[in-house]
């Protein structure tokens, strides 16, 4: 049942409505409910012992204390292995790792990420302290040694001030028990009463065997999304639709899962429902804040696609061949990215056969890179969960920048936690090849000369566009992509760019409306004219000068489509190359295919 109603049986009233009004200033007038529960978590074997470091030597002993006060320092050759962002000098519960299990033991391959020290506190800049094999969830101190670390100055905004209420969009994450986990603005502790009201609303509707989905008022939308033991809430006065806001909440949930894994979060709250998850996520606010900022302006999230760096097909093929040749057992993805734009990607064949890499997982990876400059310190080896591919498991990501300006980043993703040396050797071969063939300079030139710019199209009245092809060969197995130039004149200020993106979000919501989807929209705004068009072959959003008529807009789009067709090999990766790797000796295989996931670890992600 999907219904919009203001019935006394479901509308917030009394103390609940009063609390929402006082706590957040959003008077509810309409409640949307759905009696269908959100999908339950998938069961599965998790893995992933954090083994992060920022130099070329994997840690063989307990990590050396990191910089104090949550600051991440630069790695040096004689500094020893670091777990950046964690101040272990203040921790009394870190012990030496026990000897690892035998390589071929059954226990080593069947342990999961839901056990082993997943509730340890970390006061560093980034989430999760290292944990060690041999533990279990029963050994975790769910009480914790003390309260989470104090928030940074930027998060000390007064939640009673008008400036706090004036933000266009708030995002809250809390547990089913009402424990605050994250707030986009302000301190979670100061918002505990407001989050308590949100919990009361969720519980009140659940008592009637329903699930609360949204509260609508004249000025605000309050959208709820329950994912396992977590409740995510968006309070927005933007023009975004309920579906768009819910998709953003799902991204926030996936970002949390990418750091902890789904099975870890589920098992912790099964053990203790009022556990304070901020102990594991301490410092991750920067990553979540960065994600939400990008979703307010980046078409990648709106279109559910990845933008490729415009590059001559011959140059991209040269990069892909280097990635394809530099392989090692259990390497599943080789990704080269420049300023958030995909340059090349190579995937292991068994992954291609089973499922494709979802754009959501790449968005989360790119957001981690953009969320902190600490990845630029050197070579980083860290566990990472790809929630759309395997939400209960860790892969191991090797991250290294290839240029002094830190614009070109190489990600090599493996299933083997011990593969750092072999993966690092792959990086050296790739970097040597890129330099020898002059590809680093070619990529740098492509970054400075955006081939998808409207000036290259040569149509004066075309101000901007977003194009997503839907006819890629084997589309169900290929990465969804789009192309769009940077927003330029006449949109010069951030407010003007935000205005244009708001219009795109509005058109997107109308095109993809669940109630009445449209295929073509011609929209005349105050300062511009827009046209959105969706067919079986593409999805296109265009912006023109205000005097462009509908007939002129169609003519311009015809010219644009011809140009895009001519340049498609430069703008898109049409068929990502594949390679086959051999599993490490002694590791099992599933159905004759490479065992992609090393389930030998237990732990939580420690980034930087």
Image (cartoon, helix red, strand yellow):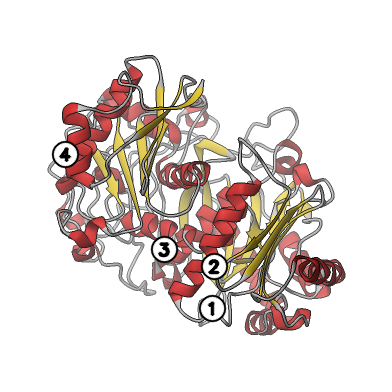
Residue drawn at 23 percent across, 65 percent down: 154
Sequence-first tag of 3 and 4: 4
Residue receiving disc 4 = 193
Residue receiving disc 1 = 491
Sequence-first tag of 1 and 4: 4
Residue drawn at 56 percent across, 37 percent down: 390
Q: Nearer the viewer, residue 135 or 351?
A: 351
Tell me the distance, in whole angstroms, between the alpha carbons under discs 4 and 2: 36 Å
Tell me the distance, in whole angstroms, between the alpha carbons under discs 1 and 2: 8 Å
Residue receiving disc 2 = 500
Locate the C terminus and report the quarter of the image it occupies: bottom left
Q: Secondary structure at mark 2?
A: helix
Left or right side of 597 for 25: left
Sequence-first tag of 1 and 3: 3
Residue receiving disc 3 = 371
Instruction: Give how far across and how far down residue 583 sits, in percent.
Output: 67, 42
Q: Secondary structure at mark 3?
A: helix
Q: Secondary structure at mark 4?
A: helix
Say if mark 4 contacts mark 2, CB within 8 Å.
Answer: no
Say if mark 1 contacts mark 2, CB within 8 Å.
Answer: yes
- Residue 437 visible? The answer is no
Quarter of the image holding residue 197?
top left
Crowd tier of the residue under label 4, counting other residues whose Cα lies within 10 Å: few below 14, some 14–19, many 20 or above: some
Numbered circle sitting on residue 369? none
Instruction: Give how far across and how far down residue 182 sits, in percent.
Output: 29, 47
């Amino acid at each position: 049942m999907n219904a919009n109603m203001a019935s006394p049986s479901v509308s917030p009233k009394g103390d609940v409505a009063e609390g929402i009004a006082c706590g957040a200033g959003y008077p509810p007038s309409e409640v949307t409910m759905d009696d269908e529960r959100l999908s339950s978590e998938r069961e599965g074997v998790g893995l992933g012992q954090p083994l992060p470091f920022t130099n070329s030597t994997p840690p063989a002993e307990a990590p050396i204390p990191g910089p104090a006060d949550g600051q991440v320092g630069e790695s040096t050759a004689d500094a020893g292995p670091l777990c950046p962002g964690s101040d272990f000098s203040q921790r009394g519960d870190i012990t030496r790792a026990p000897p690892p299990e035998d390589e071929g033991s059954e226990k080593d391959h069947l342990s999961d990420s839901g056990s082993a020290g997943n509730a340890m506190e970390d006061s560093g800049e980034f989430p999760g302290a290292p944990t060690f094999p041999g533990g279990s969830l029963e050994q975790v101190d769910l009480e914790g040694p003390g309260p989470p670390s104090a928030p940074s100055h930027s998060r000390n905004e007064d939640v009673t001030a008008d400036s706090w209420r004036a933000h266009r969009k708030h995002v809250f994450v809390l547990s089913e028990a009402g424990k605050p986990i994250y707030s986009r603005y302000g301190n979670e502790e100061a918002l505990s009463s407001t989050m308590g009201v949100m919990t009361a609303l969720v519980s009140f509707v659940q008592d009637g065997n329903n699930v609360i989905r949204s509260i609508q008022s004249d000025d605000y939308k309050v959208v709820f999304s329950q994912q396992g033991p977590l409740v995510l809430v968006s309070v927005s006065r933007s023009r975004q639709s309920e579906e768009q806001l819910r998709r953003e909440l799902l991204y926030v949930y996936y970002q949390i899962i990418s750091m902890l894994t789904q099975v870890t979060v589920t098992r912790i709250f099964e053990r203790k429902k009022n556990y304070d998850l901020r102990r594991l996520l301490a410092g991750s606010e920067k990553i979540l804040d960065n994600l939400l900022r990008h979703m307010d302006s980046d078409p990648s999230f709106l279109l559910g696609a990845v933008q490729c760096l415009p590059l001559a097909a011959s140059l991209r093929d040269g990069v892909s061949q280097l990635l394809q040749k530099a392989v090692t057992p259990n390497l599943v993805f080789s990704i080269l990215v420049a300023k958030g734009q995909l340059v090349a990607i190579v995937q292991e064949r068994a992954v291609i056969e089973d499922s494709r890499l979802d754009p959501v997982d790449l968005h989360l990876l790119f957001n981690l890179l953009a969320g902190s400059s600490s990845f630029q310190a050197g070579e980083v080896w860290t566990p990472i969960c790809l929630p759309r591919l395997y939400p209960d498991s860790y892969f191991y990501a090797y991250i290294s920048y290839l240029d002094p300006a830190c614009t070109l980043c190489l990600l090599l993703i493996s299933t083997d936690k011990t593969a750092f040396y072999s993966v690092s050797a792959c990086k050296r071969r790739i970097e040597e090849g890129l330099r020898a063939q002059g590809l680093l300079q070619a990529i740098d030139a492509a970054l400075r000369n955006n081939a998808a710019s409207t000036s290259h199209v040569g149509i004066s009245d075309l101000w901007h566009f977003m194009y997503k092809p839907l006819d890629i060969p084997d589309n169900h197995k290929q990465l969804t992509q789009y192309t769009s130039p940077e927003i330029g004149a006449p949109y010069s200020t951030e407010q003007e760019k935000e205005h244009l993106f708001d219009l795109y979000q509005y058109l997107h919501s109308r095109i993809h409306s669940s109630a009445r989807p449209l295929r073509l929209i011609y929209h005349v705004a105050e300062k511009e004219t827009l046209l959105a068009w969706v067919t079986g072959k593409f999805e296109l959003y265009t912006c023109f000068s205000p005097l462009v008529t509908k007939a002129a807009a169609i003519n311009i789009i015809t010219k644009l489509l011809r140009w895009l067709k001519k340049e498609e090999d430069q703008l898109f990766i049409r068929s990502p190359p594949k390679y086959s790797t051999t599993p490490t000796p002694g590791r099992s295989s599933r159905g004759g295919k490479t065992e992609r996931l090393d389930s030998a670890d237990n732990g939580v992600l420690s980034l930087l």
